[in-house]
Image (cartoon, rainbow, N blue to C red):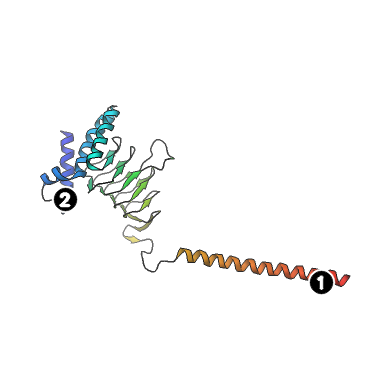
Amino acid sequence: MGWINEIKKDIHSIMERDPAASSAMEVLLTYSGVHAVIVHRLAHWFYKHDHKLIARMISQIMRGITGIEIHPGAKIGKGLLIDHGSGVVIGETAEIGDYCLLYQGCTLGGTGKDHGKRHPTLGNNVMVGAGAKILGPFKVGDNAKIAANAVVLKEVPPNSTAVGVPARIVRQNGKRTLDLDQIHIPDPVAQELAIDRIKLAKLEKRIAQLEAKQSIKEEGKNADL
């Protein structure tokens, strides 16, 4: 009965948040994200009871059907909405809080250098945009938002918005932390060239000073002769 109640909570959560959902039956029968989460809960039960081969077989079959790969070891809270879902990858030690939203193509993965806890932990009400990558064993705080195609490599505080590659915090607790102007962005190449020109000018000045000193020394030697 507990498993059925979890499914009901998932469906109810989707009905509340997805304007395209017209009925609970539609969600249950046609939403691949729901299918992936339901079957994951079954696979996770086998995983916890040390039937890991069965758990992996179940998850791989569902991956082939839905295009969503959830390792059976991942811990998922109630009300997860995987919208569209194709290409979503959730690693073995990932943890997802309640009422999170994942869009297509996002990854909760590892970096390949960590052992034990290797994947991220999402708090409650976290939104992960399409194509975003969250890589490593850190936490994304409650109510955080990860922008589409962002690559997150370190902890994200609660109530924050992370944008870019690598991701930076641009908003926290409703206040802007970085300038979001996408038009008047400094050209990084031009900035580097300007820095190089300054360094070159300093070197030329230093060379001129050394040449002047050397010239004075040579004139002194010639005078002695």
- Does 148 sit above or below residue 112? below
In the rendered image, which quarter contains the C terminus?
bottom right
Q: Residue furthest front?
A: 64
Which residue in the protein does label 2 denote?
16
**Marking on residue 52:** none
- Does 5 sit above or below residue 206? above
> Disc 1 on helix, strand or loop?
helix
Q: Position of residue 112 (x, y in %)?
A: 42, 40
User: From this viewpoint, is residue 181 visible?
Assistant: no
Name the amino acid type tagged 1. Glu
Q: Position of residue 83 (x, y in %)?
A: 22, 49
| Mark 2 residue crowding within 10 angstroms, few (<14) / some (14–19) / many (20+) | few
In the rendered image, which quarter contains the N terminus?
top left
Q: Residue at x 51, y 63 (%)?
A: 192
Say left or right for 72 vs 206.
Answer: left
Q: What count of labels does the image hold? A: 2
Q: Earlier in the sequence, mark 1 or mark 2?
A: 2
Q: Position of residue 224 (x, y in %)?
A: 88, 70
User: From this viewpoint, is residue 29 visible?
Assistant: yes
Name the amino acid type tagged 2. Glu
> Disc 2 on helix, strand or loop?
helix
| Mark 1 residue crowding within 10 angstroms, few (<14) / some (14–19) / many (20+) | few
Which residue in the protein does label 1 denote?
219
Q: Residue at x 24, y 33 (%)?
A: 58
Q: Residue furthest right?
A: 225
Q: CA distance from mark 1 to mark 2?
A: 89 Å
Say left or right for 14 vs 168.
Answer: left
- Does 194 sit above or below residue 21? below
Mark 2 and mark 1 in contact (Cβ < 8 Å)?
A: no
Q: Nearer the viewer, mark 1 or mark 2?
A: 1
The residue closer to the viewer here, 95 or 193, is 193
Q: Residue at x 52, y 67 (%)?
A: 194
